Image: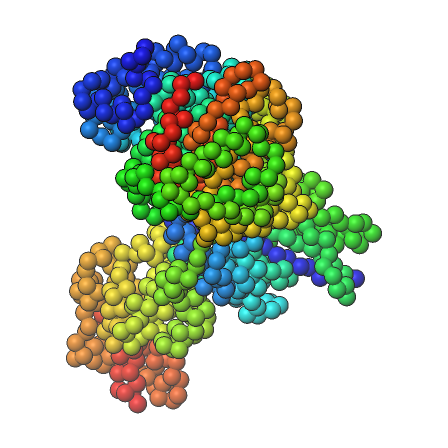
Amino acid sequence: MSDSAAHLSITELQRDYRSGKRTPVEALTDVIEAIEKKDPGVGAYLSLESGIALRDAENADVTLPLGGIPIAVKDLINVKGQDCSCASKFLQSAYTSTYDATVISRLRKAGAIPLGRTNMDEFAMGSSTENSGIKLARNPWDADRIPGGSSGGSAIAVANDTAIAALGSDTGGSIRQPASFCGSVGLKPTYGRVSRFGLVAFASSLDQIGPMTKTSEDAALLLSIMSGSDPLDSTSLSDAVPDYLNELNGEIKGLRIGLPVEYFTHGIDPGVRQCVEDAVSHLEKLGAEVIEVSLPHTEYAIATYYIIATAEASANLARFDGVRYGNRAPDPNDIIDHYRRTRAAGFGDEVKRRIILGTYVLSSGYNDAYYVRAQKVRTLIRQDFTAAFEQADVLVSPTAPTPAFKIGEKSGDPLQMYLADIFTIAANLAGICGASTPCGLVESDSGTQLPVGLQVLGPPLGEGTVLKVTDAFEKTTNWHRRPC
Amino acid sequence: MDYITTIGLEVHVQLKTQSKMFCACPAEYGVQPNSNTCPTCLGLPGALPVLNRRAIEYTVLAGMMLGCETPPVSKWDRKNYFYPDMPKNYQLSQFDLPLCLGGNVPLYAHCYPKDAQKDIARPEQLIGLTRIHLEEDVAKSTHAAGGTTIDFNRAGTPLMEIVSEPDIESPEEAFAYLNSLRQILIYGELSDADMEKGQMRCDVNVSVRPQGQEELGIKIELKNMNSVSAVRRALHYEIKRQVEVLKSGGELVQSTRRWDDDLGETQQMRTKENAHDYRYFPDPDLLPVRTGEIIEKMRSRVPELPHQKASRFVADFGISDYDASVLSSDRDLAVYFEAAAKDSAAAKKIANWVINNVSALLNEHDIGINDCPVTSSKLSALVDLVESGELSNNQAKEVFSALFDAPDAEPDALARELGFEPAESGEIEAFVDEVITANPGKVAEIKAGNDKLINWLTGQVMKASKGKANARQVGDLLRSKIN
């Protein structure tokens, strides 16, 4: 097992392929074995496509940028011929993708192999993966704790060495926060950098697909391939895609790092605060210049987010009506009865809560007070970041105010749960990019070690700079390769 | 007491684009159900819309033809409601920033119902437009005993909605509005706009109020009229119904009613209380449209409108107002006429030929002008033969019929084949002399001033020449010989 390929990063595995040390079939077999052995305890995967993946591995061309590299895919990204359930009972065993998402076709073209579908909060709504309609997921560092969410399965698989790399999606922190809780690297790209075509929409103006990996190098490699303009997504950006891997030169001397004062005021777990402060000192030692910046509208971010995201979700999830696909309630009396019972049985509580909230804020008479006003605040939040990035090249904060919390600890209190995303949500509202990389461990009250994530936010299309910082940090600390 | 009627129309028009509004599926009809579908127009999870630029161009062009203003920025909104024919359960439409604002539709006299054309209350009236916007069509549901089937071929095809101001005052004006609008859309080659084929669909808002009352009456919406004449019938029924309710002391409620063309009545569908709350909000998947470049591009493509063409025909060809309006009412007929008339000295005669002889033969063969085997240049050549006196009108009709069957032939050659030799003048003169000699009594009467008998004598010459002679030439010759 110690020589299993499953614990390798993409770049390490590529080295082995190219030196002839391993073949893609061997590596895939190792990963599948690791999943079979370790996944039942944590529930990262919803399904595996071992047969097809092994066939793809037999024909893999290891000279391609991602030749023969298996990738775990969050269960809301369409992969042709595979079930896509979004961890919802409504779609479970009742919907098979008829097409590849643009990211999947780009990864395939580069030689990557989609291996399996990872667990998540139903339709990406949640911060703990407790809202999965299919399977409970556990933190690989402490089985009594949640892995974070919504991309909990992808974060677990990468941290638990049951995946080489994975795809997640981030609407309010859904890549960065579980990466932080599980001790993996996660990048949310700038809105529009990666095509959303084929990503089942939660909140269309906030959603982005991003890499979840063992190293920032791997994130850079995946991002270079996933990014770029897509004629099938009108909101994709046409800006040229740099070779992100090339930008990771470890050189952060003189780079201005901004600490948002509003992020360091209250509610941060002391252990988390210590890890982040140590990380900031470390970056300073590497030559970065640390300054304070202000994001004055921070306190409105969560309220703004839960109006805009739920409004968009209420429309995005309307299509799940059981008319063309999905599980239907039997023997309806009429079409309204069909809609009512199919959706009541198909959706979990959190999804229903958000649909109802979103429907309410868009309703006639309330639209101006909520949705229209939230859009105005969103503009102010965006302007906060524009101003901050005039002073600093990147902003640094904890990814989440606490380490992973206990299963059930917050599931009865949606507001407490929403606060788990307090540091990540504003980046989605502003459309900027950000990454989380492990920066330390704290001891829980039950004596387990829990990872802490360092969030690095960059301006629009600043992925190169963000990854340069996280990569420099990783190469001089190694928190990212601690076994759980 | 007299009542004033106020009518406003919302017209949906299918645009003649190659592909659907937000995906590359063909926008074609009459093919295997659900064959023109893809993840986007089926509303599959994860699929996204991409704008059909041509549909935007067509809508901007429609706006230019109708005198609308096109604001520099237009955007897309989601209109939320559940119905099985709508794959996403929201429709991509335009709420507060439509592509076109204002403008108007002129009511053409020939577009009124035939029985109402003599008594037009407001000649040359313009009906104001509120806006024109673009949206996606829904799928087609077919309800049968065993259940409902849905064909998504129509889902996501471009639909242009033209909303009028409440400027229409009678069912006849509504009829004229729809026909005039249809003609204009056909002129722009934007749609075939045939209501009976569902290419043009119309919802009607109608209210009545007592004469002297300032504020409008209670607005009632009518749906399910499948032809222009059904709109007229439904309005006649509904106006009468509303007036009767008011006269009997009843109250009208804001509501939507469905027209049943078989029963000839409207029936209540829903009242305002259970109206939809569409919860419009901007679609985050589509970027706003900047119209500047599109306006520039379409400026040169604005065609002459029917009434402009009619005026030009009067001015350029000296044809009557009536002929000009008949010709311009059918764009293709107008194009045919103009092609035939442009190099001819006999434009008036050509207009007459197109309106009467050509149209009659087309009707007989049940084909349109674009399928007319006789080209416009052949018609022009034929009418020239009549004008120069080489053929009589009746002979020319026969030649035209023959041309219809042998479209490659030349009119003069065909005339000779039919034996319509331009008679040698000596030969005709011999017939004229013969007839004068044979009818001394008639000749005497002519000399005494009964000029009408010339026609009788002409007929005798024609008969003797077996129709080869030209009646006018013969008449002239008879006159000069007798007097």
Residue A479 visible in image:
yes
Tell me which residue sits at (35%, 36%) in the image: A472
Q: Which x, y percent locates residue A221? A: 31, 34
Asked if one can make out residue B19 in the rendered structure from this viewpoint, the answer is: no
Please tell me whether residue A282 is drawn above or below residue A330 in the rendered image. below
Quadrant in which the N terminus of chain A appears:
top left
Percent of width and height locating residue B294: 39, 59
Q: Is residue B221 left or right of residue B31?
A: right
* Residue at (55, 20) in percent of width and height: A444
Pick out the residue farthest to the right: B249
- Residue B16 position (above or below residue B303): above
Name the residue: 47% across, 40% down. Answer: A396
Residue B341: % across, % down: 31, 71
> Please, is residue A57 above or below residue A273 in the view?
above
Residue under the image location 56 percent in, 67 percent down: B126
Nearer to us in this view, B193 or B357: B193
